[in-house]
Each structure stands twice: as structure tokens, then as C-alpha cells.
Image (cartoon, rainbow, N blue to C red):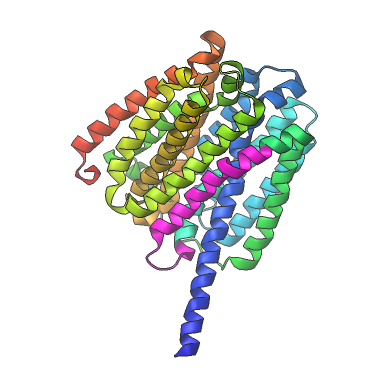
Amino acid sequence: MKQLLNANQSTLRTQYTRVLLMGISAFVMNTTEFIPVALLSDIANDFAITTAETGWMLTLYAWIVAAMSLPLMLLTRNFERKRLLLGIFAVFIVSHLLSVFAWSFNVLLISRIGIAFAHAIFWSITAAIAIRVAPEGKKALALSIIATGTSLAMVLGVPLGRLIGQWFGWRTTFGGIGAVAFVVFVLQAKLLPTLPSMFKGTFSKVPELLKNPLLICLYLLIFLVFTAHYTAYSYIEPFMREIGSVSESFATFILLLFGGAGILGSIIFSRWGDRHDTQLMVISTIIMLISMLTLLSVVSSGWLLSLTALLWGTALMLLIISMQSKVLMVDADAQDMLMSMFSGIINLGIGSGALIGGYAVTTLSLSSIGLVGSSISSIAIILIVYMIRRFPSMR
């Protein structure tokens, strides 16, 4: 009996360790996605271009992920998941090496394309892998750990990457991400079990899924939320520096606080998400709208800006996890495909938001990004109200 108990405890430890490793993998992948936001001014200065032009790093990356997530997921649908994950990280590491030695902005963009391809497949399979390696009955916990990895990318990855970039140059930041990714690669090879693909769909499954009106509304909501968020967030660093006259160290603190709030959001969801995901979705969207609407008026006050970052970051993470949870419930046999489209639409929103934010900066002013973002959030709120009235599962 004692040996059986010890064996069960060992199995549980292994399962939790694997879930944690997937959270760390998410941390690495999202750090490289978000880090250009914190280094936008440094990269622009190095290549003698404007911050709006540098913002194309965000748009190009996001739109490649959006365009390639579903095709690459379908092309790799029969691949064993552990080998696929290791292949993804190999491409990720090599692409970061190219970022370190990029001799022109175009070469840097090419390196980001390689990373975007890795990203596109990673987020198509990560949630399903985490659920499969997690202990029984711990689905919400597995998703929360993945979300926590995303949050830590903002809490630790982005501020630490910014500090390293300030001290040693932005290229060192990209090199550091590649080095951490190599360590994760080794751990994945050692710890993850063989995971045969469980995907049962084909290309013909896509039209079937897209006939589901709830799924279409969820994807539209995801697009609107991320377009609104990245309209403002893509240019938050120059906004704080130029409009609020915020110091470099305090700007780093705000980015840190924003990411830390994401951890709070994942904790809230792990406790109440299974029963109240719709309510959390509504409240979070309203908080995001208010945060962006008041951004210009609070940027000159350290306390108010900090409070806004805390609320905004918490709301964003709650939205991500609650929408992901609802999308995964649409079809249990096509979770990889659902998450592939989920990731693609998120990145379509990120690219659109970065583009709209850049347009607002160049045609209106840098100070307008919060107002423009909040106007898009208002459309998202209208859509949520419609969904609650239209679909019983949203109530």
C-alpha cells in the first residue's frame, strides 16, 4: 500500500512538473512576442527609423501568425506532439540567433518571421498538451498555468528584457531569450512523454466549425478585444515617456505591474472561472474600456497610472482565459484546430491593433491611442450583450 501511495505521489509530481514546463514554454514564447513593445525606441534608434515604422515588427509578426496558424496546424496534424514541440523550439532558437546578428531592420524582420512560424504552431498545440499531461480533473489549473506563463512574460520577461536592453543593448535581450529557449528545449526532451496526435479533423472540419454561430461570435469578440488592447498597448512605452514624461525606470515598473496583474487574473479565473466565466468576461471588457478611456488623464499621475495598469492587466488575462475556455468547449474532438484559429485571430487582432495604433500616432497624435482603443472596446461590449441574449450557454 505504501509503495502504491509513493508511486501515485511520484506520478502526480511528474504530471505537475510537465504542466509547469508547458507554462515555462509559454513564458518564453510570449516574452519574445511582447518584448518589441518594451524595446521599440531602442530598436528604432539603432536602425535610424521612427517608432511607428518599428511597430511593423509587431504587425508583421502577428499577421504571419494569424495567416499561418491554421494551415501549419493542419499540415502537422499527424505529427507526434513531443517531436513537433521540439522542432518548433529549434526553429525558435535559430531565429533568435539571427535577431542577435541582424545587420539591418529587414534582416531583423526576417528573423521575426521564423519566430512567428514557430509561434503559430506552438499555440495551436500547447493548451491541448497541457491538458493531456495534467493530473485528472485539473483542466482549469493547466489552462491557468499556461496563462500564468503568459503573465510572467510581461512580469519578468518584458521588464527584464527591457533592463538588459538598456544596459547591454536590445540584441543581448534577444540572445538571452534564445538561450533560455535552449534550456527549455533540453527539459522538454527529457521530461515530456511521447504524445501521439489525437487530432481527428481534416481540412473539411473547418467549414463545419465556422458554421457554429457561437464560435464565430467568440472569435469576433477575441479579434475586437485584442485589436482594442494593442491599439493602445503597442505604443504604451513611447506614450508614457513622451506624453506623461515618465522616467525609464517608472515605465519599466508599469510594464512589470501590468504583467503582474495578469497573474492575479489567472488566480481569479482558477477559483471562479469554471462557474462564472461569462460574468468575468463582461466585467473585464468594461474594465479594459475604462482603462483605455482614462489613459490620457492618468498618465501624469504615478498612482493613478499604476492603478490603471493593475486593473487593465488583470482584465486582459481574465478575458484571454475565459474566452479560451469557451472556445475549447465548442468541440472536444477538434481542440487543436479551435486553438489554432484562436491563436490566429488573437494575432490578427494584435497586428490590426498595432497598425491602427501606428495610424493614430501618425495622423492624430500619440496621445490619442487610449481613446481610439476604447472606442473599439465599446463595440466588443455590444457584441457580448448580444451573445448573452442570443446563446443560452453564455448566461
Question: 226 or 150: which is nearer to us?
Answer: 150
Chain part drawn in magenta = 132-161
What x and y, as percent, mark residue 228?
43, 26
In this view, 388 is above or below 293: below
Quarter of the image where one finds residue 312: top left
How many numbered marks, from 0 up? 0
Question: 227 or 60: which is nearer to us?
Answer: 227
Image-based side of 383 in relation to 290, left or right: left
Would residue 156 be visible to someone looking at this image? yes
In this view, 323 is above or below 232: below
Would residue 353 be visible to someone looking at this image? no
Q: Residue at x 69, y 45 (%)?
A: 177
Question: 27 or 189: which is nearer to us?
Answer: 27
What x and y, as percent, mark residue 75?
53, 49
Residue at the bottom extreme, as displayed: 1
User: Is residue 148 a member of the stretch shown in magenta?
Assistant: yes
Q: Main secondary structure of the magenta part?
A: helix
What x and y, as percent, mark residue 188?
62, 61
Quarter of the image for the C terminus: give it.
Answer: top left
Q: Residue at x 56, y 67 (%)?
A: 194
User: Is residue 339 a member of the stretch shown in magenta?
Assistant: no
Quarter of the image where one finds residue 342: top left
Q: Residue at x 77, y 26 (%)?
A: 104
Quarter of the image where one finds residue 175: top right
